[in-house]
Amino acid sequence: MNHTFIALVENKPGVLNRVASLFRRRNFNIESLAVGRTEKPDVSRMTIVVDCPNGEMDAHKIEANLYKLVNVIDVQDVTHQPAVTRDLALIKVRVSPERRAEVNSLAEIFRARIVDVAADSVIVEITGTEDKIEGMIELLRPIGIVEMVRTGQVAMTRGVNDGVRRVPMSANRLEMYEAAEMLP
Amino acid sequence: MKKTGAEILWECVVREGVEVVFGYPGGANMPIYDAMLNYPIHHVLVRHEQGAAHMADGYARASGKVGMALATSGPGATNLVTGIATAMMDSVPVVFVTGQVAAHLIGGDAFQETDVTGITLPITKHNYLVTRADEIAEVVREAFYIARSGRPGPVLIDICKNAQVEQTEFVYPESIRLPGYQPVTRAPSDALERAAQLIERAQRPVILCGHGVLISGAEEALMHFAVKTQTPVASTLLGLGAFPASHPLSLGMMGMHGEVHTNLAIQNADLLLAFGMRFDDRVTGALKAYAPRAKKIHIEIDPSEVHKNVAVDVPLIGDLKTVLHDLIPLVGEYDHDEWLKTIAAWKAEADARSIMNWSHDDKLYVAHLITDIWKATDGNAIVATDVGQHQMWTAQYYALEKPHRWLSSGGAGTMGYGLPAALGAWFAHKDEEIWVVAGDGGFQMTQAELSTVVQEGANLKIAIMNNHFLGMVRQWQEFFFEKRYSGVHMKTPDFVKIAEAHGIPGRRVTTRAEVDDAIAWARRTEGPALLEFLVEQEDAVYPMVPAGAALDQMLQRPVRA
């Protein structure tokens, strides 16, 4: 099954390569990977969805190996935690002006938006969970999808919940991060 | 004060305690070589960068310090790769510094440009690409810290040529900031309690002593724990020497070529205490059949090793020495006499098949020769091996009493490791007796370093076990490929002449009668000496657990009529 990890990493060149390379090296398949800045300029946040055929064992492996990367600050597994997960898709649908209304009403049902209209196509923007987006895609497919792009999932736990951290830490990494200086 | 990047590199390296570096100059690291002249560094010019990597590795294993190697960009750096991977697999702290083309040329396929940080990403603990002089001080400080702390490993710093020559204000960083790198040292007390309960209940416990015991400096703690709980100690290939071989609780080596009674003890144990080892496939045999009745406690500093190959009951993540110190007061003095007697009976049964009982039929058997060298050196030499049959025989028969005297490529299994590793070790222990045991195949891979040995005046004794075969592959072809020998017969040069060409005295030994005298001659020869033993060509290493078989499904040496 798929596991969703949130990783906080140092915002430095090459870190994405290190993370991606780890999954290849340890023979895991990334389903999606979304990276972006956080509220702290020197920290980036990754949401990584990975296929874990051996369930918890694989999830432990992934978490522990992510920590081996010097630039990785924190890893949480939010798969089984109350979390908001969102994916964004832009879907270009070939549609004649006569059938636009049909697409429009579908979009409304899914709380999607039409963000571009051309003579024979429209672009639909949809945000939501993976299931919801899959649902919309299935309905648009018979009409005629020309092109599609997806951001991959981003996730955030609800309230004060944290994800699962299996790997022991010498101290709270985030506090440590704030405290900054250390002497070897 | 303003300094060039190259000067800053050496300022920092000297502060890390580095005295000797192994390397090879080239276009992209010339400023580093130029600046080096002004610092108290002894540079060893190798004959191939792979040699530099193994020397730094051997130096690190023998000294317990961080080794250091230098190479230029492109082919210089790629030649290091085998040595970096070797250090990575065996958790050896080495800092590699490579030159890189100027920052503005990167990505343009400039002369001798190679993406070295990309190439070494999966075989280093961490690596850096430095494009500016003002990054160097912090990077060097971090690199040495990362290399030696936690689970040690190689760190590579790729420094662009412009960063080597640019001038910048040099301020030695008093502290560094590594928010994502916080090795755990102590295990939580509830886990320690659970471990202590399992230990108290155990009737048939076995300690699996790995390289981590040596890295953590936990030899004394291990002894204390083993004696207090009367638990026998089996060793991995790289754990040899951490527990004295002559101790009544020592079981010797486990695994594919481990001893029969050792593997039987593991398979019949009700508790395995894995100390700083990682359940490599060469020590477990078939995982499904591995120690089926044993609970498992795993003390390990690298969380990614826990549950990786073998699911364990109590993982204790932390520094082995610290964890053992915390654990020892929680365990009582136990008595496992019955268990120890059972193991002793297995040993007696297996010993009947030992090659040591074979009469000398005027063939040279490597197992006998290793025993001869062991006797002559009182088991006190530092021994470096290559990889293959001779490596296993040395592990089996050069019984080690003391730590940090065993240099062998375990995880990577790198042929050609022995000679350069021994030379590296010599820089850490110039007054000690150092032996290289190599096969005829592996020795030729790095034999160019004989020239380095002579240039440095290193006192190494080299024993080449020449069977004119790539012996271990030949053995597998004999056992598993119907003796269809493919690509394993090797015509070898006259190794004595090769030695002499380098100014190293050498002797060839072909009969049993010459052995003792030849070893004595090599030992009393001042400086390096080489012995070429023409050994039995088709001997096999026993016992052997065939790949994929359970650990107790061992092929044993046929009983000799």
Image (spheres, helix red, strand yellow):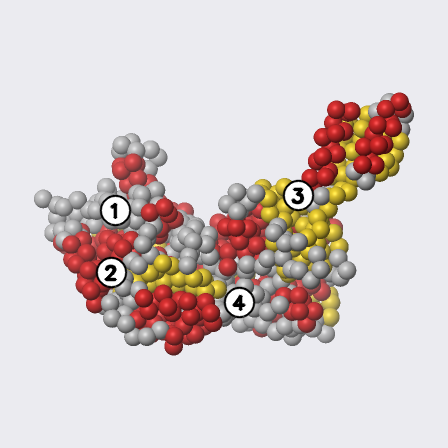
Q: Position of residue A81 (x, y in %)?
A: 63, 54
Q: Is residue B373 visible?
A: yes
Which numbered marker is on residue A32?
3
Q: Disc 2 or 4, which lies upstream in sequence?
A: 4
Decide which of B482, B268 is in the foreground and name it: B268
Q: Are marks 2 and 1 in contact (CB under 8 Å)?
A: no
Q: CA distance from mark 3 to mark 4?
A: 30 Å
Q: Is residue B232 left or right of residue A125?
A: left
| Residue assigned mark 4 | B184
- Residue type at mark 3 is Ser
N-terminal of the pair, mark 2 or mark 1, is 2
Asked whether the residues under the numbered discs 3 and 1 touch, taking CB atoms below 8 Å apart as contact, a structural biologist would say no
Helix, strand or loop at mark 4: loop
Q: CA distance from mark 2 to mark 1?
A: 27 Å
Could you say whether the residue bearing mark 3 is in a helix, strand or loop? strand
Residue A19 percent across, percent down from the top left: 62, 50
| Left or right for B550, reference B4 | left
Residue B83: x and y in percent read 48, 53
Q: Residues within 10 Å of mark 3 (few under 14, many from 20)?
A: some
Residue in the image at 34% along x and 42% along y:
B548
| Mark linked to residue B554 | 1
For the residues marked 2 and 4, what is the alpha-carbon distance in whole angstroms?
A: 42 Å
Q: How far apart are the alpha carbons under marks 3 and 1?
A: 46 Å
According to the picture, the residue beneath numbered tag 2 turns out to be: B373
Q: Mark 2 to mark 3: distance in Å?
A: 58 Å
Labels 2 and 3 share a subunit: no
